[in-house]
């Protein structure tokens, strides 16, 4: 198969080929998913220097475990489980969960810098920075549950499986996270 054919290949086909030892299929699969994994960790982690390491660790775990994936249709949920577990392992390794602390002064500094003059529109990147800063104020369990729902688009049932919690807990966490974000961003929305 040529490189162009891998790029055009169906996602599930790439998974099956990679499971059977096709290195080029695995390379293409990684190319397609690494940006999403990086973005997910950038929303979960305050320390910028750790985002790339977490992404690489997750991709390595995914590549090693891919032959064990029984149904390629479940790849997205399975991968999100790896991302979640990698983040939880990282949180445990970090001293006193320092990655989860957020400096209130820094949040206010970001808000001050992003203030728009009357008649001007804030740029998307500025709004994104505000949302990310507000996300970092959420406790880890609320943040990861909300990101799995809103960013990854997973069902409540899938999130329940990934986080090893009940469906009611998932719904409650998402609701609380949305309320906290709404409160944090109320002056901007």
Image (cartoon, helix red, strand yellow):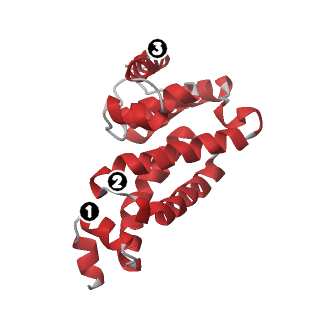
Task: Kindly identify which residue carries mark 2.
Answer: 75
Q: Do the CB atoms of the residues marked 1 and 2 lie less than 8 Å apart?
A: yes
Whether residue 134 is visible here, answered yes or no, is: no
Task: Kindly identify which residue carries mark 1.
Answer: 12
- Mark 1 vs mark 3: in front: 1
Left or right, residue 118 beside residue 7? right
Identify which residue is drawn at 44% across, 20% down. 169
Q: How many marks?
A: 3
In this view of the protein, which residue sits in the foreground, 53 or 58? 58
- Dot placed on the residue nearer the N-terminal end, 1 or 2: 1
Q: Could you tell me how far apart the alpha carbons at marks 1 and 2 are, in whole angstroms?
A: 8 Å
Identify which residue is drawn at 58% across, 58% down. 57
Image x and y of residue 170, in percent = 41, 24
Whether residue 164 is visible here, answered yes or no, is: yes
Q: In the displayed image of the protein, which residue is found farthest to the right?
A: 95
- Dot placed on the residue nearer the N-terminal end, 2 or 3: 2
The answer to which quarter of the image holds residue 29 is bottom left
Left or right, residue 17 beside residue 127? left
């Amino acid at each position: 198969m040529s490189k162009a054919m891998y790029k055009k290949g169906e996602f599930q086909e790439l998974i099956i080929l990679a499971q059977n030892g096709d290195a080029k299929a695995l390379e293409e699969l990684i190319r397609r998913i690494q940006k999403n994994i990086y973005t997910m960790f950038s929303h979960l982690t305050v320390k910028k220097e750790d985002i790339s390491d977490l992404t690489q660790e997750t991709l390595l775990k995914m590549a090693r475990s891919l032959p064990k994936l029984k149904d390629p249709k479940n790849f997205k949920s399975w991968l999100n489980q790896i991302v979640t577990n990698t983040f939880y392992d990282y949180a445990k390794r970090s001293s006193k969960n320092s990655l989860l602390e957020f400096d209130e002064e820094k949040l206010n500094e970001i808000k001050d810098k992003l203030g728009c003059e009357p008649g001007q529109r804030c740029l998307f990147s500025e709004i994104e920075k505000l949302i990310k800063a507000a996300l970092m104020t959420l406790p880890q369990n609320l943040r990861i549950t909300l990101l799995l729902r809103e960013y990854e688009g997973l069902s409540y049932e899938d999130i329940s499986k990934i986080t090893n919690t009940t469906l009611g807990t998932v719904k409650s966490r998402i609701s609380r996270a949305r309320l906290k974000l709404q409160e944090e961003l109320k002056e901007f929305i």
